[in-house]
Image (cartoon, rainbow, N blue to C red):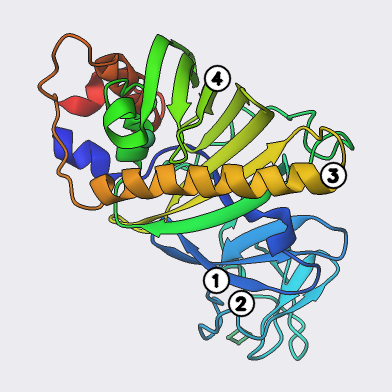
Amino acid sequence: MSQDDVWARFPRGWFGIGFSNEFPKGEPKPIRYFSQDLVAYRDDHGQVQVLEAHCPHMGAHFGHGGKVSGSCIVCPFHAWKFGGDGQCVEIPYARKIPPRARVKAWPIREVNGAVLMWNDPDGGAPDFEVPVLPEIGSASWLPWATHRYHIKTHPREIVDNLADKAHFPAVHRTDIDEFGFDTDGVTATQRVRGRAHFGDGKVDPFASTTTYHGPGVLLMRMDGLMQNRMMLLHTPVDAGTLDLRMGVTLKVVGDEKTTAGYVDMYMANLRAGFEDDIRIWEHKVWRHPPLLCEGDGPVGSLRKWYRQFYRPIGRPEGEAQS
Ligand code: FES
Ligand SMILES: [Fe+2]
């Protein structure tokens, strides 16, 4: 496999397909990720299920008119019923169910107010979990303020940011005083102390710890003027585009209404920051290896860490390159 072919695979790991409130009970939703048409539905027990979208019978899309029944979805065309494991369990007008009447199903977790689906191009089972943030759902923190972008880029560009120390002053008007980076298995962590410069001349000194849990879920804690948590979920839609969802929350200080006003300000700043990145991502080319110099961050170590999620299962590092 050549260097370029490796990146043509989709990464293995947990990927956000939406915040919890995007999946009301009983409303199947057509979604598309990893170049596949899918249906997501919250079943009558509250569990989100994700199945291949098209019925094996005559090809109807479950997400357009399908009905939820118990843990199953009923096809809108001839009412074949499929369980959350993708197996057809009932055909209203036939006693015998054809053995191939099943669709693919994906492992799902609902954690930190988001729905994650497990993607593994080799069909492997989940081998790590995303940690629970105790702040989410607690009375002393606000619910997530959320936003979603659809971006024309490859996920590796988003992940590169974690180690790219030198882009902070140029893109984000942020001075970095301390920058640390380390990896441990499926996690990669950046620790920063710095000063953010706002348009109105205000300076916010901050300390942040930002960790990728696998290739698609980032959790950040930042302590500055306020205590802030951020979640970033980026998920490939197809080979050239992805959805990036962000959630931000603040610890309530004083009353909730005042803190909520600050969240709007934080979100506006974060969005401005991402939009600066997006402008770069959507037009750049991939350089590997990049031409690095003194003062650049540990981009090489980050890329080495990130490559593990593209490796065919069970293959040691390096084999996927040849
Ligand atoms: S196409 Fe789904 S039941 Fe016929
Ligand atoms: Fe950035």
Instruction: Quadrant for the N terminus, please.
Output: top left
Could you give the CA–CA distance between mark 1 and mark 4, rounded to whole angstroms?
45 Å
The x, y position of residue 185, in whole percent, is 49, 15
Corner quadrant of residue 69: bottom right
Q: Nearer the viewer, mark 2 or mark 4?
A: 4
From this viewpoint, which residue is outermost toward the front?
201
Corner quadrant of residue 62: bottom right
- Residue tagged by mark 2? 63
The x, y position of residue 310, in whole percent, is 34, 33
* Tag 1 secondary structure: loop
Q: Is residue 270 above or below residue 295?
A: below
Badge number at residue 206: 4
Q: Which three-letter amino acid code belongs to the residue tagged 2?
A: Gly
Evaluate if marks 1 and 2 touch, with contact meaning CB atoms under 8 Å apart: yes
Q: Which three-letter amino acid code belongs to the residue tagged 1?
A: Ala
In depth, the one of 306 and 197 nearer the eye is 197
In the rendered structure, the answer to whether residue 232 lies left or right of residue 226 reads left
Could you give the CA–CA distance between mark 1 and mark 2, rounded to whole angstroms?
7 Å
Query: Counting residues from the N terminus, which is met first, the one under dot 1 or under dot 4?
Result: 1
- Residue tagged by mark 1? 53
Q: Residue at x 36, y 31 (%)?
A: 173
* Tag 4 secondary structure: strand
| Mark 3 vs ligand 2: CB below 8 Å | no
